[in-house]
Image (cartoon, grey):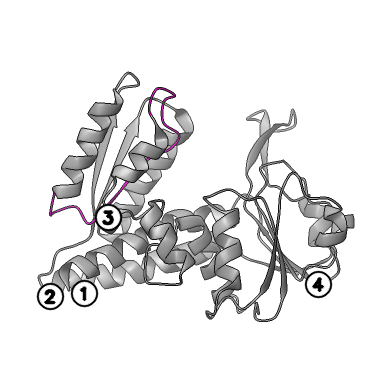
Amino acid sequence: MILLDGKKTSADIKEEIALEVGALKRNEKKAPHLAAIIVGNDGASLTYVNAKVKACERVGFESTLIQLPEETTEAELLNEIEILNVDNDIDGFIVQLPLPKHIDEQKVLLAVDPAKDVDGFHPENVGRMALNLPTFISATPFGILELLDRYEVETSGKNVVVIGRSHIVGSPMSILLSQKRKVGNATVTLTHSRTQNLEAITKEADIIVAAIGIPEFLKGNMVKDGVVVIDVGITRVADASKKSGFRLVGDVAFDEVAEKSSFITPVPGGVGPMTIAMLLKNTLIANKRRNS
């Protein structure tokens, strides 16, 4: 069993990006500039956005963090987005989700300029992804592709089962892995909460992407020997033996499934660290497109 080490791989990618940024600066070209908007004081969101800012500093990017109060109106947020859309110094930006309930998330995502949508959530970018055209692939699916590529996991002709159909992970993964691309050419089954006989389906899988959001959902008796497992989930569960009072688990019962796996991502330290690395990579791509 080989661990797909997202922590190490993301560090490698950041180092590669830092070298490219260094070359840009030596040639007196503009360093990439990533901006982030966060509305409210959600603890997890603040932690995540601050990690993005630190990652920008590490690779030599410029970064801008716009923190807005919880009571910010939808119109005020849309105005902030428009300011970033027309700011030529900003290569890409994200609006941190979730947003307060009084703000229409879909309206906000539609307002982002697709050329600066480094999260890859705008319908134009999702459509281009589905057609296998150059675009921003959302960071988590992009990170999974990169992990599979760097560990030379064969996907061509393989039977892939994706568990979960979210717009952020499950649906795009099912499309990407079925496409004619280096990490692709697989036969993909997209499963979800209404799927019947799921265990029979997962037992036939060569590769499983678990992104259903249920802690330790995928058990050892649901997989075959030699399976490749990508665990996208991360949930806090109570654990009195830990100083924090909790531990982090994925959508996979790791100890059971790892025994039968050829490759598997740990939680934490698997898919999670890849997400920020690929957001940086998307921002570098945006910078190159804008300044080519």
The residue type indicated by label 1 comes to Ala
Q: Position of residue 148 (x, y in %)?
A: 59, 71
- Element type where label 2 sits in the image: loop
Q: Which residues are magenta?
A: 87-103
Residue receiving disc 4 = 226
The residue type indicated by label 2 comes to Asn
- Element type where label 3 sits in the image: helix
* Mark count: 4
Residue at 44% x, 35% y: name it: 45
Residue receiving disc 1 = 23
The residue type indicated by label 4 comes to Gly
Residue 23 occupies quadrant: bottom left
Q: Say few, some or many: other residues with alpha carbon within 10 Å of mark 2 (under 14 / 14 to 19 / 20 or more).
A: few
Q: Say few, some or many: other residues with alpha carbon within 10 Å of mark 4 (under 14 / 14 to 19 / 20 or more).
A: some
Q: Select label 1 or label 3 by which is in front.
A: 3
Is residue 144 visible in the rendered image? The answer is yes
Q: Position of residue 235 (x, y in %)?
A: 64, 39
Q: Earlier in the sequence, mark 3 or mark 2?
A: 2
Q: Earlier in the sequence, mark 1 or mark 3?
A: 1
In the rendered image, residue 98 lying in the magenta stretch gets the answer yes
Q: Quadrant of the C terminus?
A: bottom left
Q: What separation in Å lies between label 4 and label 1 (alpha carbons)?
A: 42 Å
SS assignment for the magenta stretch, majority: loop
Residue receiving disc 2 = 27
Q: Select label 3 or label 2 by which is in front.
A: 3
Is residue 5 visible in the rendered image? The answer is no
Residue at 38% x, 51% y: name it: 122
Q: Select label 4 or label 2 by which is in front.
A: 4
Q: Earlier in the sequence, mark 3 or mark 4?
A: 3
